[in-house]
Image (cartoon, rainbow, N blue to C red):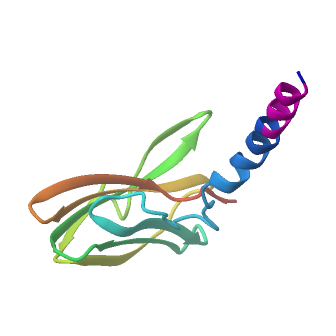
Amino acid sequence: MKKIVVFVLVVCLMLSVLPNAWALEEPEGPGEIIDEYVNASSADVSVKGTKASTMIRATCEGKTGTTGISATVYLQRKNGSSWVPATINGASSISFTGTSSVDRTFNTSVTAGTYRAKAVYKVTCNGSTETITVYSSSVTFS
């Protein structure tokens, strides 16, 4: 009986230590990636500035072997609990391409409200294409 009690205690002790040893590293901030994508080493979109001078920046870096990246960027405005389309200089979206990476900045103006950007990247690497969708943090302009 004593051996069984000792065995159970040892197993319980081992199980209490395992979750900490196997825990994954948490991202330190928005846009930081820990092996999240197959074809990209990073993908991000951000919104900042003022309502008169709003800057949207979209960046995506392909991994070695990347032959093309296409990007489409959208601006969204919060309406109640939903996100609805907003325009970037009168356009519903802006698209652009690059070979192994893309990094574009767009300036626009907005009315008062809460906004975020959405970027959809299609990254082709070693013959396969991966679609990556990222959102910026929300920003409120008054």
Residue at figure coordinates x 44%, y 66% from the top left: 44
Task: Name the one closer to the observer, 31 or 104.
Answer: 31
- Inspect this view and state whether residue 95 appears: yes
Q: Is residue 2 left or right of residue 116?
A: right
Res 62 quadrant in image? bottom left
Q: Is residue 16 magenta?
A: no
Q: Is residue 62 above or below residue 90?
A: below
Res 14 quadrant in image? top right
- Inspect this view and state whether residue 23 appears: no
**Residue lying farthest to the left in this orientation:** 127
Q: Is residue 6 magenta?
A: yes
**Residue lying farthest to the top in this orientation:** 1
Task: Name the one closer to the observer, 26 or 85.
Answer: 26
Residue at figure coordinates x 81%, y 30% from the top left: 8
Task: Name the one closer to the observer, 8 or 63.
Answer: 8
Q: How many marks?
A: 0
Residue at figure coordinates x 47%, y 49% from the top left: 76
Query: Residue 20: x percent and y percent?
Result: 72, 53
Q: Residues in magenta?
A: 2-10
Q: Main secondary structure of the magenta part?
A: helix
Query: Residue 96: x percent and y percent?
Result: 21, 69
Residue at figure coordinates x 30%, y 59% from the top left: 38
Task: Name the one closer to the observer, 10 or 122.
Answer: 10
